[in-house]
Image: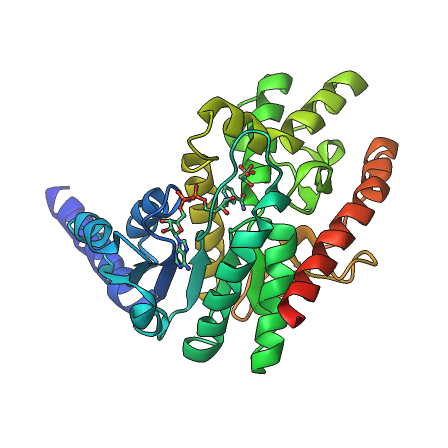
């Protein structure tokens, strides 16, 4: 039996090595805004992801320190820090995924749209560089207002002749993360097994959690569903107010960003049935961009899944969100083309 256990562990060791060094492809992930409140914990979480072989950390300031710090962690990826616009090309070259948490966050009393004037320009410049240096990368847009920054990115890529709608994602995973947490608390079920789709966009009432499709099923009252919906829609504001002027969600966002990037990596690597909600170019409603469940594959978006059956409350929410979402989308398109 000793011999058998040695043999078993040898076989296991070989399988691990085969999986570790041959079956997992090299993948470069770039984080733009890597020294920020989201960027730093996101860099940490991406350094812990065994699917990443190169981690590129870019910001306009402070990246050498972040890169040196994260780079000492004994996991697979090699870390490089890049600072300032003249190093942006190097930071991006060869990237499979570019995650963008660059830009200013909200303070109490502000809406996400109040960030437009500063962040639209930042996103525009970064996307021009992406079109030039890594036009085939999947772009994970975190910078707010997501409802406008994603259309801006699309227009910039169109102008550069590199647009592929399958490769541009607004990261709405934090809405799903919140919906799961709040639902599990109310339904008194273990959060690890909870699923809740969140559709629409990423601001206020454009965030539409579909609790009628939440699993495991729970018999919640209409009032409970209403309250859960409102808390999910106001989740960002809850954090902004609690931080009282020191920014918005960073740690939960880094977690959500890492989950979404991991799903993109798995899709690229050919793992089947990888599904996450994301704000993408879409035809499932009359709006040109819409968040819904998306199946991820080797080229990015493989399939946009439909909304599924909606409750009357959700149908009302869907109609109510359309004017605001459309106007945010149009604002982004107009900015990119002016
Ligand atoms: P932060 O101010 O802490 O960090 C932003 C970082 O971006 C800074 O390090 C800054 O130097 C950098 N930056 C500014 N201009 C840049 C440029 N041109 N190129 C590269 N980097 C640049 O802010 P934060 O808390 O990390 O938030 C970042 C953004 O993410 C905000 O717009 C915020 O609203 C958004 N956000 C989105 C979600 C979401 O769910 N999608 C969640 C939370 C925050
Ligand atoms: C969030 O949902 O936490 C982010 O969009 C940041 C914000 O401004 O609320």
Name which quarter of the figure residue 175 lies in: top right
**Residue 110 position within the rendered picture, expressed as x and y whole percent measured from the top left:** 59, 35
- Between 79 and 337, the residue placed more toward the observer is 337
- Position of the N terminus, as image quadrant, is top left
Q: Is residue 165 visible?
A: no
As drawn, 67 above or below 187: below
- Depth check, front residue: 188 or 152: 152
Point 57% across, 64% down: residue = 168
Q: How is the image coloured?
A: rainbow
Q: Which residue appears at 58% of the width and 72% of the height? A: 156
Q: Is residue 125 left or right of residue 21?
A: right
Q: Relative to 149, is 108 above or below?
A: above
Vertical relation: 108 (above or below) 337: above
The answer to whether 64 is drawn above or below residue 207 in the figure is below
Q: Quadrant of residue 290?
A: bottom right
Q: Residue at x 43, y 40 (%)?
A: 255
Q: Is 301 placed left or right of 3 in the picture?
A: right
In percent of width and height, residue 161 lies at 58, 83
Give the x, y percent position of residue 122.
Answer: 48, 60
In the rendered image, which quarter contains the C terminus?
bottom right
Camera-nearest residue between 294 and 145 = 145
Q: Position of residue 2 (x, y in %)?
A: 11, 42
* Residue 289 quadrant: bottom right
Name the outermost residue toward the bottom.
161
Total number of numbered labels? 0
Q: Is residue 6 visible?
A: yes
């Amino acid at each position: 039996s000793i011999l058998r256990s040695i043999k078993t562990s040898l076989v296991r060791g070989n399988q691990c090595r085969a999986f570790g060094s041959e079956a997992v492809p090299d993948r470069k992930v770039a984080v733009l805004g890597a020294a920020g409140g989201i960027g730093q914990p996101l860099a940490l979480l991406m350094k812990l992801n065994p699917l990443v072989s190169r981690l590129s950390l870019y910001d306009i300031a402070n990246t050498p320190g972040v890169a040196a710090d994260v780079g000492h962690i004994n996991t697979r990826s090699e870390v490089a820090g890049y600072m300032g616009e003249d190093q942006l090309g190097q930071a991006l070259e060869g990237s499979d995924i570019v995650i963008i948490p660059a830009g200013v966050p909200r303070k109490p009393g502000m809406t996400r749209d109040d960030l437009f004037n500063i962040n639209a320009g930042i996103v525009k410049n970064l996307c021009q560089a992406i079109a030039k240096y890594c036009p085939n990368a999947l772009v994970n847009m975190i910078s707010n207002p997501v409802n406008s920054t994603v259309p801006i990115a699309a227009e910039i890529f169109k102008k550069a002749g590199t647009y592929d709608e399958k490769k541009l994602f607004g990261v709405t995973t934090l809405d799903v993360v919140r919906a799961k947490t709040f639902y599990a608390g109310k339904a008194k079920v273990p959060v690890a097994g909870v699923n809740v789709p969140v559709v629409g966009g990423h601001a206020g009432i454009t965030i539409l959690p579909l609790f009628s499709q939440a699993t495991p099923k729970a018999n919640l009252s209409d009032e409970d569903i209403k309250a859960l919906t409102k808390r999910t829609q106001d989740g960002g504001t809850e954090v902004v107010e609690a931080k009282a002027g020191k920014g918005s969600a960073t740690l939960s966002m880094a977690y959500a960003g890492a989950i979404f990037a991991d799903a993109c990596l798995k899709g690229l690597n050919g793992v089947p049935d990888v599904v996450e909600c994301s704000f993408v170019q879409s035809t499932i409603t009359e709006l040109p961009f819409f968040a819904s469940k998306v199946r991820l594959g080797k080229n990015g978006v493989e399939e946009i899944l439909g909304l599924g059956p909606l409750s009357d409350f959700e149908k009302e929410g869907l109609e109510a969100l359309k004017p605001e979402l459309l106007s945010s989308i149009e604002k982004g398109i107009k900015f990119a083309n002016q």
